[in-house]
Structure formats: structure tokens, C-alpha cells
């Protein structure tokens, strides 16, 4: 199945590019095609990630051919990164494993400022369950991982009705497929419609929203999230405005926790905005809220919202905050959010190196095994869950070094099964370019995964030296140590690993 999906996708993507190039010279696509091959030799003193006393050492060899495509034109751009990872002796089983890995995004503008189409696709390997974590395709029991394929397309229309209104209408289709495990293959259909008042309404502003998403699961029941709402604003003067909001939530999924409640919701309140750097908004009703925005100086922006909801997917007390502070050399980000989602939706969000971008060949992390994101992906089951996630990150850049650290916590409550899990931890990295063509990378992290089945404490540390041998040939050597302790003996292990990498680009 995954081979068929990959073949159809690549043929369709490249065919679309050729059509665009050939139809009109004004639409000519400037393509950059970069084939590559990665050679990896891995030695592990605990290839099966077995408990103490059962360790087994082994060598693993991987050959990974691939290519990177970047295309740009006046109305179209695409990024595609594909690799075929061939591994001998993964997990010490003396077999040959083939893993498809794909990242793809594109944006096609049919009418500037009016209509565009976005698409995306990915293939990666993920843990089936957070109770038995592996971090790549080389070690551990590979039956604990599944190949996840995603595809999405979203045509979007952004009409403007003179000075009276601006709109947005988006119809999205997404698919998530799993090669094994309890996770269903899911087709998701979404419709998002928004209409805002234009400049003509200087005294009275308004907004209409409609959001609908249906997940059709191959096994289990379908899931629907639907919300319709409207806002009316009356501007008393430049500093004060009155606000009325109302809507209707109509969600349909199995829940035994009481976090979700359908029905009408409303609130009445206002906003005080004495300057561009400070504002307070509040509304009282069955869905009450308070939002504070503060920016004491240009480099700092902080928005915090508190809600008390009687209706919707997240009822009760709900918090959200977003802080960003930056200087010429450093950036600080603080975020906290609570939402209700599905495993399939999280997989769609986390497929692109987890920040929405693709790595290019000149990126120092290009070619590294970055598919696994065991800190954030929940247990792969068909269930809606409430997610509470907070993250604090800091990065500092000098002429030759980049320092970064990240602290995170995420709690998940599954609505039907009532399973609860929590992941929290800290990690840091240091990249130092101590010679013109040589980089060193030092990283370390500590993570706790607490589920209904076990509590796992994981520590990892890695040191890598990377050298640009020739213009199109890079090499590196890496040492990595992983220690995981658990109240379940089968999840406790130590591993020392040495990896040699050669990366050739053509």
C-alpha cells in the first residue's frame, strides 16, 4: 500500500511540474534537482535495546539514495525530499529493511490575492505506543513502529467585496494511513468559511465563521468537529469598543470524560486599548474570557487568554499564552495551549521536521534520521484527546556557535478510553563551527513519559563532528548514549552507539 501511495504521488507531482513548465514560458518553473546518497555504518552495544544482562552488540549498515527538488516560479513553488532507506541487520535480525521517507509541500497561485492551492505529503516511521519507545530504524524491535503516510490538499479562495467585506473559503482533504497497529486509515474533510467587515464599517465591525471537519475512520466510528460563530463590535472611540459574540458547537465523538458539550454559547463585553502596546478584552456569558496583550517594547510581545467555557470541546477553565522576545542574537519563545484533537491530526501537524519546513541539502541536519518525534506524538490509537501543552525555548547565536534549549510538557486525556499520559522534559544543543569546513554538535536531553502502563525516564547524549570533505561530499562521526529506566523492566536499557556517515550530493 505505501509503495502504491508513493508511486502515485511522485508521478502526479512531477507530472504537474512538467505541465506547468511546458504550458507557458511565463510560468516557467526554476527547478533545482539534487540527487544524493547516504552511507551509514552503525555499531551498537545493545542493538535490541534489551534490559541489563540481555544486551547484544551488532553492526548495522544503511544505504539511502534520495533526491531533493525545489521549484520556484511567479505563481508556483514546491519542495520535495525523498529517501529510500535500505538497512541491513536492523535490530540485529540479519535481514534487509526498506523504508520510504518523504516530505513534500507545494503552493500554486491560480489568481494572485484570490485563489491558491496548497498540498503536502509525507512518509515516515513512528512509534506505535509510547510504552516501548525507539528513536530510529536501526535499533530495537521494529514491530513497535509503523510507517505513517499522509497526504493533504487545500484549495483556498480569498474574495474581496470592495470596501464592504473580505472573505476566506477553504476546502481541505487530508489522509493518514498506517502500515500496522490499532490506528485507523483516516480520510478527513474540512470546510472553513470566514467573512470579515471591510473598511466601510468603521464604527460597527462584524465577523462570521464556520468550521467543520469530519474524520472518516476505516475502523471505528467517524468523528466530527463543527463550530459556527459570529462577532459584532461597536467602536465607541479609539480606545474603547463593545463586543458581542455567539455561536453553536455541534461536535460528534465518543466521550466519557465530560470535557465536551454541544449547544449555543455567547458572551458580552468589550475591549480597552489605550495604546498599540497594551490592550485588555473581556466577555461574560456561558463562555467567558479575558485576554491581555502587552508589548512594553518592540522586541517583546505577550498575549494571554483565560476562558471559562460551558460549551465546546474544552469546557471548564482553559488557558492560552504566547510570549516572544528577541534580540539581535537571541530568541525566547513561551507557549501554552489547550485544545481537543485526534492522533491523526497531530501526525499531520508533525510530519515536516515538526516546524513546517523541509531541510535542504546545505542544512547541517540534512540526512540525519529526524523522522521520530517520540516526545510529542501520542499513543497511536483511534480516540479524541484533550491536549495541554506548554513549551519554553531559547536560542542564542554568535559568529560561529548556535546554542539552544527547550523545556516542554504535554498532558493528554483520551475521551473514550480515559487513558491519560504525560510527557515532559528538557533538551539542549550546541553547534560550533570551529573550522571553516568543520562543525561540532553536542546535544543532550532528559524526558519522562508517564502512561497508565509505565513510567519511563530517558536520558540521551550525543556528540558529532561533521566535515565538508569536498564540495559535494560530507562526512561525520557521532557517539550517542541512551539510558532509559522504567518501572517496567522490559522498558529499561542502556545503549552506546557509534555512527559513521558519508553524504554525497550530485
Image (cartoon, rainbow, N blue to C red):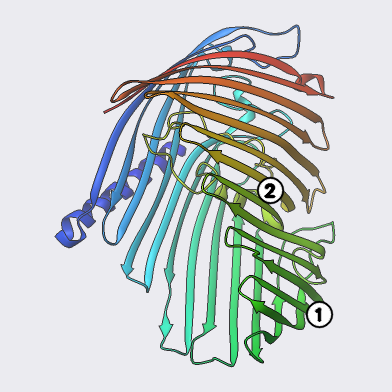
Could you say which quadrant of the image residue 282 lies in?
Answer: bottom right
Q: At 62% from the left edge and 43% from the top edge, which residue is drawn? A: 394
Please give the name of the residue rendered at 53% of the width and 81% of the height, measured from the top-left corner. Answer: 195
Q: Where residue 235 sits: x, y (%)?
A: 64, 90
CA gap, disc 2 to disc 1?
A: 36 Å
| Front in this rendered view, residue 456 or 436 | 436
**Earlier-in-chain disc, 2 versus 1:** 1
Q: Nearer the viewer, residue 335 or 349?
A: 335
**Above or below, 238 relative to 372:** below
Work out whether 187 lies above or below 11: below
Residue 382, labelled with which disc? Answer: 2
Tell me if residue 76 can be seen. yes
Q: Position of residue 172 (x, y in %)?
A: 49, 63
Label 2 packing within 10 angstroms: few (<14), some (14-19), many (20+): many
Q: Is residue 325 above or below residue 39?
A: below
Residue 29 relative to residue 40: left or right = left
Q: Is residue 129 above or below residue 105?
A: above
In front: label 2 or label 1: 1
Does any portion of residue 218 appear in the rendered image?
no
Answer with the quarter of the image where residue 485 lies. Answer: top right
Q: Does residue 112 appear left or right of residue 155 in this picture?
A: left
Residue under numbered circle 1 = 284
Number of numbered callouts drawn:
2
What crowding class fits label 1: few (fewer than 14 Cα within 10 Å), some (14-19), or many (20 or more)? some
Q: Residue 232 carries which label?
A: none
Q: In which quarter of the image is residue 117?
A: bottom left
Judged from the image, the secondary structure of the residue bearing numbered disc 1 is strand
- Quadrant (top left/top right/bottom left/bottom right) for the C terminus: top left
SS at badge 2: loop
Q: Do the residues labelled 2 and 1 touch (CB within 8 Å)?
A: no
Q: Which residue is drawn at 35% across and 24% down?
A: 37
Where residue 443 sits in the image (x, y, percent)? 60, 27
Amino acid at each position: 500500500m505505501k509503495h502504491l501511495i508513493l508511486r502515485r504521488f511522485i508521478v502526479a507531482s512531477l507530472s504537474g511540474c512538467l505541465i506547468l513548465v511546458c504550458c507557458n514560458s511565463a510560468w516557467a518553473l526554476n527547478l533545482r534537482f539534487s540527487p544524493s546518497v547516504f552511507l551509514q555504518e552503525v555499531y551498537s552495544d545493545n542493538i535490541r535495546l534489551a534490559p541489563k544482562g540481555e544486551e547484544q552488540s551488532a553492526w548495522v549498515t544503511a544505504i539511502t539514495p534520495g533526491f531533493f527538488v525545489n521549484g520556484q516560479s511567479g505563481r508556483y513553488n514546491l519542495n520535495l525530499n525523498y529517501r529510500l532507506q535500505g538497512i541491513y541487520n536492523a535490530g540485529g535480525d540479519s535481514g534487509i529493511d526498506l523504508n520510504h521517507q518523504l516530505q513534500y509541500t507545494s503552493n500554486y497561485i491560480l489568481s494572485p490575492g484570490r485563489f491558491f492551492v496548497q498540498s503536502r505529503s509525507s512518509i515516515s516511521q513512528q512509534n506505535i505506543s509510547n510504552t516501548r519507545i525507539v528513536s530510529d530504524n536501526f535499533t530495537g524491535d521494529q514491530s513497535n513502529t509503523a510507517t505513517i503516510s499522509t497526504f493533504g490538499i487545500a484549495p483556498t479562495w480569498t474574495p474581496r467585496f470592495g470596501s464592504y467585506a473580505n472573505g476566506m473559503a477553504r476546502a481541505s482533504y487530508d489522509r493518514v494511513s498506517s502500515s500496522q497497529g490499532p490506528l485507523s486509515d483516516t480520510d478527513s474533510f474540512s470546510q472553513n468559511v470566514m467573512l470579515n467587515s471591510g473598511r466601510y464599517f468603521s464604527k460597527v465591525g462584524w465577523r462570521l465563521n464556520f468550521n467543520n471537519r469530519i474524520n472518516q475512520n476505516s475502523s471505528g466510528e467517524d468523528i466530527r468537529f463543527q463550530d459556527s460563530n459570529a462577532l459584532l463590535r461597536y467602536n465607541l472611540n479609539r480606545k474603547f469598543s463593545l463586543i458581542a459574540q455567539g455561536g453553536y458547537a455541534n461536535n460528534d465523538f465518543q466521550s466519557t470524560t465530560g470535557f465536551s458539550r454541544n449547544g449555543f454559547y455567547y458572551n458580552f463585553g468589550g475591549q480597552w486599548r489605550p495604546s498599540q502596546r497594551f490592550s485588555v478584552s473581556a466577555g461574560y456569558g456561558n463562555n467567558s474570557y479575558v485576554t491581555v496583550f502587552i508589548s512594553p517594547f518592540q522586541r517583546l510581545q505577550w498575549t494571554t487568554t483565560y476562558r471559562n467555557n460551558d460549551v465546546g470541546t474544552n469546557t471548564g477553565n482553559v488557558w492560552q499564552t504566547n510570549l516572544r522576545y528577541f534580540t539581535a542574537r537571541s530568541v525566547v519563545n513561551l507557549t501554552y495551549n489547550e485544545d481537543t484533537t485526534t492522533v491523526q491530526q497531530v501526525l499531520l501537524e508533525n510530519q515536516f521536521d515538526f516546524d513546517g519546513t523541509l531541510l535542504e541539502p546545505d542544512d547541517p541536519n540534512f540526512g540525519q534520521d529526524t523522522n521520530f518525534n517520540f516526545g510529542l506524538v501520542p499513543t497511536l490509537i483511534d480516540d479524541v484527546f484533550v491536549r495541554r501543552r506548554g513549551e519554553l525555548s531559547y536560542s542564542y547565536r554568535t559568529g560561529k556557535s548556535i546554542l539552544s534549549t527547550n523545556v516542554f510538557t504535554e498532558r493528554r486525556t483520551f475521551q473514550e478510553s480515559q487513558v491519560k499520559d504525560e510527557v515532559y522534559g528538557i533538551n539542549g544543543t550546541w553547534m560550533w563551527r570551529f573550522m571553516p569546513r568543520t562543525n561540532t554538535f553536542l546535544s543532550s536531553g532528559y524526558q519522562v513519559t508517564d502512561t497508565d502502563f509505565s513510567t519511563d525516564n530517558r536520558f540521551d547524549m550525543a556528540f558529532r563532528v561533521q566535515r565538508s570533505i569536498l564540495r559535494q561530499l560530507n562526512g561525520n562521526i557521532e557517539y550517542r548514549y541512551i539510558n532509559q529506566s522504567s518501572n517496567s523492566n522490559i522498558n529499561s536499557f542502556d545503549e552506546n552507539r557509534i555512527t559513521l556517515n558519508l553524504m554525497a550530493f550530485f
